[in-house]
Image (cartoon, helix red, strand yellow):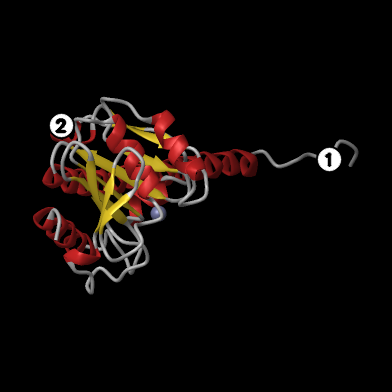
Amino acid sequence: MKFEAARQRVVEMSVLLADHGYFAATGGNLALRVDNDHIAVTPSATDYYQMSAADVCVLRLADLRKIDGDRTPSVETGMHAQLLRRRRDCMASIHTHQPAASALTLLSMPLAVTRRADCDLLGSQVLTVGYAPSGTRWLSGKLRRALRADVNAYLLRTHGAICCGSSPERTLQAIAALEALAIAYLRERIAAREASASLEQTVLRKLIAVLDAHPVQELIP
Ligand SMILES: [Zn+2]
């Protein structure tokens, strides 16, 4: 089997992501750079707990021609390829439908990254990519146009996230850092909304008290 160690690594990463809820059922996929010209990609519509290294597809990065593997490559292969062609510094890319980051895609706004440890993994910010149906060239083209050398995490509008990194381990860490950042951001938004709602209630209560103290006088008794 060609590139057996890398394909086994794809299996291990997929099981780890499934164990931690980042890959749910057959949702989510990933690609590893195996040498300068080839990538190993998760197969399409596969139960990651049943997947073996032989199921993992090896493709030529330039034109996505299949070199080895028993299955059809993931429908999002084009998206991973765009990323790994453009970001030669990255060894892996992972696409998930992870809960908090996916929820955040509904807001369609970039996220600032402030903590040093997060910046090391995610880059200076998390960027958004406009909506396009999954598995289409339209979506991979939108990602390609959004890619930047200093950003490793992207939110795909009403869909999910994609992260890249200088090693498989750092890409896995980026996925977890993005989820933690998304949860923190959503908590902040909810707290701010509750605070402004309670401020509004206080103002309204005061207004009612003022109105109660000054009942409407009939002009003509
Ligand atoms: Zn997806």
Task: Left or right? Give the position of 128 relative to 122.
Answer: right
Could you tell me which residue is drawn at 16 percent across and 61 percent down?
Answer: 16
Task: Left or right? Give the position of 29 relative to 158.
Answer: left
Image coordinates for residue 13, horizontal then vertical, percent: 17, 57
Residue at the spot of label 1:
218
Image coordinates for residue 34, horizontal then vertical, percent: 16, 45
Number of numbered callouts drawn = 2
Could you tell me which residue is drawn at 15 percent across and 36 percent down?
Answer: 166
Residue at the spot of label 2:
120
Q: Nearer the viewer, residue 2 or 135?
A: 2
Q: Residues within 10 Å of mark 1 (few under 14, many from 20)?
A: few
Image coordinates for residue 177, horizontal then vertical, percent: 21, 44
Image coordinates for residue 196, horizontal then vertical, percent: 45, 40
Are discs 1 and 2 less than 8 Å apart at CB?
no
Q: CA distance from mark 1 to mark 2?
A: 70 Å
The three-letter amino acid code for the residue at tag 2 is Asp
